[in-house]
Image: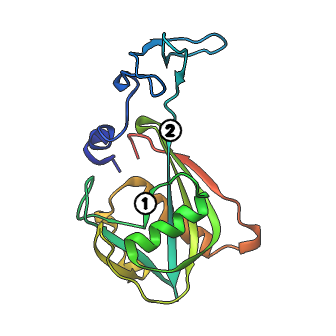
Amino acid sequence: MAAPNGGRALLSWIPMPGSIRFCTHCGAAVRLEIPAGDNRERHVCPTCAHIQYVNPRIVVGAVSAWEGRLLLCRRGIEPRSGFWTVPAGFMELGESAEEGAVRETLEEACAQVEIAALLGAYSVPRIDQVHLFYAARMLEPAHGSGAETLEARLATWDEVPWEELAFPSVRWALEIYREYAASRREAWQPRAAAWAPEC
């Protein structure tokens, strides 16, 4: 499955290496150079010597279930508005990855969940993201549409709208969850994958 718009729609949301112009410490113009002891270009302030690092962003999400049905959300925001996903979003400062997945599920699907296990990590180097997906148990069947969600629903495996999923990582997470659900839970080993254009 190809990335939506070849990944271009997502690229505009991420600060790219050439987009940082000013030092976050003193406000002076920065320049790209390789700092001493490093091996790649960084944004360095010639005035105060602060090095501005641009690192990958972490997305956290949960594949949540209630009595064998999966919690899905239809996105109400870009990118990929109108397409289906599991609750997921960027981590916030001061929270663990598990706390972020629980928060995103509450915000996007109005559902209370408890994390059961890490399903795996899905790297998307092209847009500098790492997606961490968890298996979660819904504490009750109640769910709804959060501010960024057009619709939320519980779906059996056969009811998942496979051709309308928002991102390749969502398909991957659902497929890994199916492996997890069929496994001996205590022996589960998280999976890892990376997005590639031919996926």
The one nearer the camera, 105 or 53, is 53
SS class, disc 2: loop
Residue that badge 2 annotates: 56
> In percent of the image, x 32 and y 43: which residue is there?
10
SS under mark 1 = helix
- Whether residue 103 sits left or right of residue 187 in the image: it is left
Q: Mark number for residue 26?
A: none
Residue at the image position 60 percent from the left and 63 percent from the top:
98
Counting from the top left corner in percent of width and height, residue 139 is at 55, 86
Amino acid found under the numbered disc labelled 2: Pro
Residue 121 x, y percent position in the rendering: 57, 52
Report the side of 82 relative to 41 (left or right): left
10 Å neighbourhood of mark 2: few (<14), some, or many (≥20)? some
- Residue 37, given in percent of the width and then of the height, sits at 67, 13
- Count the marks: 2
Horizontal arrangement in the rendering, residue 191 relative to residue 53 (left or right)? right
Please give the name of the residue rendered at 32% of the width and 59% of the height, measured from the top-left corner: 166
Quadrant housing residue 152: bottom left
Mark 1 residue crowding within 10 angstroms, few (<14) / some (14–19) / many (20+): many
Where 40 falls versus 8 (above or below)?
A: above
If you read the primary sequence from the N terminus, does the residue marked by circle 1 or circle 2 appear first?
2
Measured in 3D between alpha carbons, the distance from the residue under mark 1 to the one under mark 2, in whole angstroms, is 19 Å
Residue that carries the numbered disc 1 in the rendered image: 170
- Closest to the camera, between mark 1 and mark 2, is 2
Q: Front-most of 150 and 84?
A: 150
10 or 25: nearer the eye?
A: 25
Horizontal and vertical percent for residue 46? Answer: 48, 10
Three-letter residue code for mark 1: Val
